[in-house]
Amino acid sequence: MDDVDRSRTPDASGAPVGRRVVLGLVGLGAAGVVGGASFSRRLSEWLAPVELRDPTGLIATLPLGPAFRFYSVTGVVEPRDEASYRLEVGGLVAEPATYGLADLRALPQTEFTSDFHCVTGWVVPGVHWVGVPLSELLDRARPAASATAVRFRSFDGTYTESLGLEDARAARTIVALEMLDGPVSHDHGGPVRMYVDGQYGYKSTKWLSAIELTEDEVPGYWEHRGYDVDGTIRG
Ligand SMILES: Nc1nc2c(c(=O)[nH]1)N[C@H]1C(S)=C(S)[C@@H](COP(=O)(O)O)O[C@H]1N2
Ligand SMILES: [Mo]
């Protein structure tokens, strides 16, 4: 619809607004280092159980240490539960399928602990994840030989992301059911979100509603706004 157009409304300098904001965040993120690691650590101990709502991403510029921000590009998202949640797997596959929450829980699960990195600079160390390896769902769907990538959709109605098949099949690319030692909360994209280990947070679609095999990799929401299609964490 019009979400791409709106974000590309030129500002006074003529640059797309999304990109200008991202560059600003990188600059302010570097300024945050001035506060020093021990200051950040003390602040974050004090803030430990706190999770921040940060729809604009601006709080990400403060040196708050390892606290999660809640991101949504669409504001309020209507919750889905046991009864209403569905995950569609389709596109270039031999066996399209629809999974409810109980179906996903009945599949083989994997779990691991890893650091969560947002590209704007905040990191949450040691996040515990549990979920179904995406490779499990892909094997069941039997992708066509012509499929080279996976496209993810969100029931927020707007967010999309993508992965090449190799990253999609990586052992730590999961359809996550648990995060931080409980079911994935609504604000973190539950009941089901993606988690793509080794890649920046924007590759991990929240409120996951569909997985579609595609012939080419289709750039996602943030990639239309300047982020790299390759979300590999560097440094
Ligand atoms: N549907 C949806 N998924 C999303 C986002 C979003 O705004 N909407 N933000 C992305 C970004 S940039 C990051 S860093 C993580 C943040 O996850 P969190 O909100 O659980 O901290 O979600 C990613 N997935
Ligand atoms: Mo992010």
Image: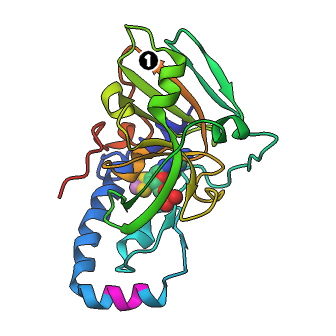
- Say which quadrant the N terminus sits in: top right
User: In front here: 22 or 66?
Assistant: 66
Look at 64% across and 37% down and name the residue there. Answer: 104
SS of the residue at dot 1?
A: strand
Q: Is residue 66 left or right of residue 102?
A: left
In the picture as drawn, the residue positioned furthest to the right comes out as 83
Q: Which residues are magenta?
A: 40-44
Q: Is residue 79 left or right of residue 162?
A: right
Q: Is residue 107 left or right of residue 28?
A: right
Residue 111 counted in the magenta span: no
Look at 38% across and 31% down and name the residue there. Answer: 169
- Say which quadrant the C terminus sits in: bottom left
Residue 68 can be seen, yes or no: yes
Residue type at the position of mark 1: Thr
Q: Relative to 187, is 147 above or below? A: above
Residue 9 can be seen, yes or no: no
User: In front here: 224 or 171?
Assistant: 171
Label 1, residues with CA under 10 Å away: few <14, some 14-19, many ≥20: many
Q: Which residue is mark 1?
A: 214
Q: Relative to 2, is 49 above or below? A: below
Location of residue 164 in the rendering, given as x and y in whole percent from the top left corner: 33, 28
Q: Is residue 140 left or right of residue 38?
A: right
Look at 37% across and 92% down and name the residue there. Answer: 42
